[in-house]
Amino acid sequence: MGGDAPTVDDVGELGVLRSVLAVVEPAAADVGPGDDAAVLTTSTGRTVVTTDSMVLGLDWRDDWSSPQDVGVKVIAQNLADVVAMGARPTGVVVALAAEGATRVDWLVDLTRGMADELRRAGVGSFGGDLSGAPDGTVVIAVTALGDLPAGREPLLRANARVGESIIVSDVLGRSHAGLLVLLGEVAPSERAGTATQECVGWHRAPRPRYAGDEAVAAGVRCAMDVSDGLMLDAARIVRASSVRLAFDGDALRAMARPLEPVVGDRALECVLSGGEEHALLATSPEGRVPAGWHVVGRVEDGRGVTLDGESAQTEGWTHFGAR
Amino acid sequence: MGGDAPTVDDVGELGVLRSVLAVVEPAAADVGPGDDAAVLTTSTGRTVVTTDSMVLGLDWRDDWSSPQDVGVKVIAQNLADVVAMGARPTGVVVALAAEGATRVDWLVDLTRGMADELRRAGVGSFGGDLSGAPDGTVVIAVTALGDLPAGREPLLRANARVGESIIVSDVLGRSHAGLLVLLGEVAPSERAGTATQECVGWHRAPRPRYAGDEAVAAGVRCAMDVSDGLMLDAARIVRASSVRLAFDGDALRAMARPLEPVVGDRALECVLSGGEEHALLATSPEGRVPAGWHVVGRVEDGRGVTLDGESAQTEGWTHFGAR
């Protein structure tokens, strides 16, 4: 992030805020940025709150991702959590800690990406906080708020019931496939065509469907965001609901097939263990599958996660060495 | 943060969470930590939200502050912002980014400090997020939520009115005085006694009175948290309310006097420009001063911040070089 463009150290905190506020849209709040805190009126009095961060060098690399990509991704992963509770996002607050050498234009483009994804979800920002950070460090901590529509119960991991279908709101595996391409661990074949770009794009800047309302309309009561890998996230539902999630290998292999030209024989691994997908994993009353969703298994009596009846590896992404 | 004690890298994310969750109290939420997001019911449907971070090496030094101190401070500065809006804190979410070499016992003690200050304010935690970070980096981003009691309007910087008294909820200057001691820029005299410890203690771990309800009971409609220095924060009220804040030098010099044994002739500077106080600065209808508050000036027709009728320096703390 060197070069001649002004840095945070050059223009100071107020200079950064001035540049950044020019591209961000305030959320619908009674009191917006500029006071000690934002005030928002919720329609029902039930607020949903979640927080998730991205760290330079760990969650993104500047040679792989544009600042817009990073902005889109950090918002998407937070809004996906709000939506996974069955709530409608109302806005975010952003706490940014950035080294003094961070370029202001990088921050403005980061904010553009955040504003863009917020706009796609129909929400804005309640404000934020800018801190300094040690050399080489940029941490973006986003907290997202949402509102549970009147009369709606939250979608909980503990609500899966025997006999329900396991459904996902989108295909899986693209983010991890894109990561493998960026890491040079796979060599996409010529017939991969645009699939490679789609995977790399999804890894850099996922654009989830935010399909919470669709799930609720189909009678879903259990949902979660696929952020750490399908099998690992499924194990969380298993623990919370005391059920068995029995996945259908054929359905998941069908989902993996379009990834084969990109990642070869690692396609199923991408579908089963790839993180940062931000599709919804849910269970729905049998026979009720929202348009565009995929049925990938069944909730059964018992415990654990199975694939074609065999106990499945429930591994996925973690930030540190041990699990 | 070296030594033989287990680090984050040793025990992994889940290991840390297990250790940390043992000492944190969940906030009163319909759905607490463990799902994609927390769900809380507000009594009125008006939610207040703010975020503020602390960064190792910039906002604290491990040789000056214990992890408990850091935990108290990061919570206090966030709750003070919620209270400055006239709201009652309901809870926090914490996004922590920490290098792998961070000791688990340091994180547990940090959490103890956070839990302790949350308990003092009568609230808990809605959950959080743990990320890795580059070597040498620890960033703690807290987002605090609050609830505006039914029928209460938020206390805004724009609400100061000519003829009101300027009041503060506590004495000022201790945090900056403590910082000067820690920096070795001043040599406390022998007669300073416990005042030095009090100042250093306030710098490490301020324990604000959270006096929002007192302010509202006295008819206050304009308040803010003193976080960047009295004069600088006053200038923000001036801009928002289009008034003059005329400070009474005698009142502020009286406040500075107990600091003189600690910081000598820099006592008034501490009162005027010292940040991280987390007292409330407010304006109240004349003659209405809550018990324990201090009258320090008057709201006048005009613009700017004055001290004994002279235009005052409105400088304070900023994270970066430029202002």
Image (cartoon, coloured by chain):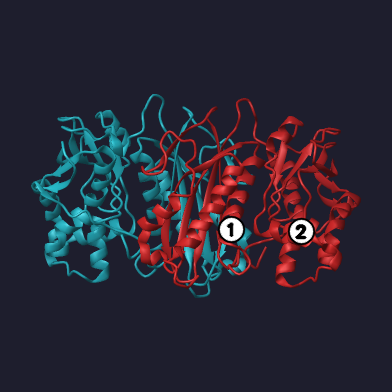
Chain colours: A red, B cyan
**Which residue is at the front of the view, B259 or A112?**
A112
Residue B131 at what x, y percent from top left?
A: 57, 60
Q: A264 or B119: which is nearer to us?
A: A264
Which amino acid, by three-letter code, is at mark 1?
Val
**Left or right of residue B51: residue A229:** right
The local secondary structure at tag 1 comes to helix
Q: Residues within 10 Å of mark 2 (few under 14, many from 20)?
A: many
The residue depicted at 17 percent of the width and 63 percent of the height is B262
Q: According to the image, label 1 marks what residue?
A: A70
- Residue at 45 percent of width and 54 percent of height: B112
Mark 2–mark 1 Cα distance, whole angstroms, equals: 22 Å
* Badge number at residue B286: none
Residue A210 at x, y percent in the picture: 67, 42
Say if residue B111 shows up in the picture.
Answer: yes
* Residue drawn where x is 54% and y is 55% of the image: B20
Q: Residue at x 77, y 56 (%)?
A: A173
Element at badge 2? helix
Residue A218 sits in which quadrant? top right
**Residue A273 badge:** 2
Say what amino acid the circle numbered 2 marks: Ser
